[in-house]
Amino acid sequence: MSDQQHHAELTPSFHAERRNLRAMGMWLFLGSEVMFFTAFFGAYIVARSAAVENIAHPLDKVLGALNTVVLITSSLTMALAVAYSKRGDRKKTGLALLGTLALAGMFLVVKGFEYHAHFAEGVFPSSDIFHGFYFLLTGFHGLHVVGGMISLGILWFRNRRGDFDEHYCDPIEMTGLYWHFVDLVWIFLFPALYLL
Amino acid sequence: MNASSGNIESHGGHSLKPYAYVFTALLALTAVTVSLSYVDVGAVLSRSIGGTWGHGANITVGLIVAIVKASLVVWIFMHQDHEEGVNRFILGFSVALMALAFLAFSSDFVWLGTYTHRVAGMLVAGN
């Protein structure tokens, strides 16, 4: 199959238009995701705002900060994967995708240790309002990380198979947008749950 | 910023330098947020400029830092600086709706403070 030849024959304006339409779809999807997290985040803020006098910080700040650094780094490797794929550098694209995948896995391992520690201490979502929101918000965020990892795995395979070149790498760019969004959610979750 | 980002690695349209800058800034801002969580910003403000500042001062500073970090990710990593037309509108509209929703949520603790204070008693078990 001569995917690359086929893509090269199409006009630049066609590539740009197709890319812009796909980006519009992804931004719309991310808009719906924003509202999804706004609902739970808003409920958490309402419950928390009244408790200003008696805030306890039951979470491990160090593990939270570590995971923040891990996700920020994964956002960097994702941005690099998109940039390399736009240059048609398949090898570097693959490495950057693998790096992003590994960092995503690392995030989930740290999160898993945290969850394990909670359960070992007998802390569950039903324990109190704070932990109800904590498990809800981090759980949904974690599911988004898992979804991203599946996409990244598929992309890595497709990149290795030669599906992408400098004319066509929309799936990598769109997954990149999604992955940065997952990082964005954590940028707000970390201070809201661990620090403030 | 694009004009000054140099001409190396310009093949493919984007220099990689901004990514490095943003990454460094994000790490630095994370360090700022974590450090500030060990400081009672409200007490510091009360001492230095007077007035009564509560925990809200910490929350405000933490929120501002988070918004700055989010803006960097959206603008540079997600290339919203190159996006135009309907794609930029969608982002703007989502953010506006989110702000509107948070404004509406805030009416709960602005006007129903007494009710929510009873809820607060059960916020963290054994507290």
Image (cartoon, helix red, strand yellow):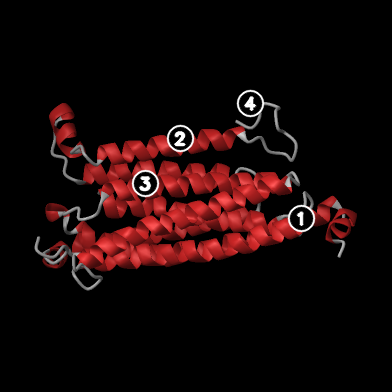
Q: Which residue is mark 3?
A: A66
Give amino acid for label 4. Ser
Where residue B25 is drawn, which disc sits there?
Answer: 2
In the orientation shown, which residue stands out farthest toward the bottom?
A: A126
Secondary element at tag 2: helix
Crowd rating for badge 3 (residues with CA inside 10 Å; few <14, some 14–19, many 20+) = some
Q: Position of residue A153 (x, y in %)?
A: 60, 62
Q: Which residue is mark 1?
A: A168
In the rendered image, which quarter is residue B26 located in?
top left
- Identify which residue, B59 or B14, lies in the foreground: B14
Q: Chain of mark 2?
A: B
Residue B92 in view of the camera: no
Q: Position of residue B34 (x, y in %)?
A: 30, 41
> Residues at marks 3 and 1, common chain?
yes
- Identify which residue, B29 or A84, lies in the foreground: A84
How far is mark 1 from mark 4, CA to CA? 28 Å
Give amino acid for label 2. Ala
